[in-house]
Amino acid sequence: MKNNRNDRNNKFNKKESKQFSKKDNRRSEEREKRNFDDQVEGRKSVLELLESEKDINKIYVTRGEKQGSINKIIGRAKGKGIVLVEVDKSKLDEMSQTGNHQGVIAIVPPFEYCEIEDILEEAKNKNEKPFILILDGIEDPHNLGAIIRTAETAGVHGVIIPKRRAASVNSTVNKVSAGAVEHMKIARVNNINDTIQFLKDNGLWIIGTDGKAENYYYEQDLTGPIALVIGSEGYGMNRLVSENCDILVKIPMMGKITSLNASVSAGIVTYEIVKQRIK
């Protein structure tokens, strides 16, 4: 009986331990999400934020002698009446999510995603054919930030990301994008395939990137209203997403490695679209 009781106690303790572990993980994830959602780090990112006219709750800067662009940040923040808080570097190190705060962290409301209609309206207001990026499951925030930075420099009207199983806009994305997220319309959708159909109904051609495609990207006419689909880092596009694309294109691979980083692929094809539109 004693052994049975001990066995039950051990099982209970293990079960209780797992429950606490799950709770701790959930709390950790919630804590991480809160931190990511409400801060912008790094001098360039905070300067871009100050220029974007978006709300800023307060800005933390390192206590001590100020040099370089940090003085520009302080001057603009004071001009806008934004609360400035001087703290020790160790405090910023503790707050930082990117590990590279450069002596400044801005606390902001959570990132505001837009609607797909807002992206189409952006193109209409500029009297341009819509140019959209659809990211099918980009999980690495560094890749997401790099793609958004490229998209902004290329004049893309908006970026669409899924709500599940994909990176969202956080402090790392903002930092890697060099503040481009403050100037880019980003929509977060429940279903990529429904979104593709909606864009088709609004006259856009859906171009997917796939290593198994027959045509190279530079052989395709990319001058019309386009939504370019970039697949995830490890698996490429979802099968249904691929099937719903109007056209599939590929990038030449001459070496032994048969795939490119998602942000590199996005940059190559994005700027081919830019080139064709300019010509």
Image: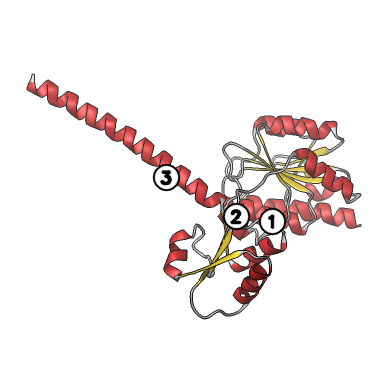
To which quarter of the image does residue 117 belong?
Answer: top right
At which x and y percent is residue 274?
Answer: 83, 55
The three-letter code of the residue at mark 3 reads Ser
Mark 1: few, some, or many residues within 10 Å (few <14, many ≥20)?
few
Residue position for label 3: 28
Q: Position of residue 78 (x, y in %)?
A: 64, 70
Residues at circles 2 and 1 in contact by the CB criterion of under 8 Å: yes
Residue 232 disc label: none
> Which residue is identified by label 1?
54
Q: Position of residue 242 (x, y in %)?
A: 71, 34
Query: Left or right of 166: which side holds 132?
Result: right
Where's the N terminus, which quadrant? top left
- Find disc 2 in the rendering and name its residue: 108
The answer to the question of whether label 3 and label 2 lie on touching residues, with beta carbons closer than 8 A, is no
Gap in angstroms between the C-alphas marked 1 and 3:
28 Å
Question: How far apart, in angstroms, are the residues tagged by discs 2 and 1?
Answer: 8 Å
- Residue nearer the viewer, 12 or 37: 37
Q: Quadrant of residue 220?
A: top right
Please give the name of the residue rendered at 18% of the width and 23% of the height, measured from the top-left corner: 8
Which badge, 1 or 3, is on the more N-terminal residue? Answer: 3
In the image as oriented, which residue stretches furthest toward the front? 81
x, y percentage for residue 268?
Answer: 73, 55
Say what secondary structure mark 1 lies in: loop
**Residue 221 in sight from this viewpoint:** no
The amino acid type of the residue labelled 1 equals Lys
Nearer to us of marks 3 and 2 is: 2
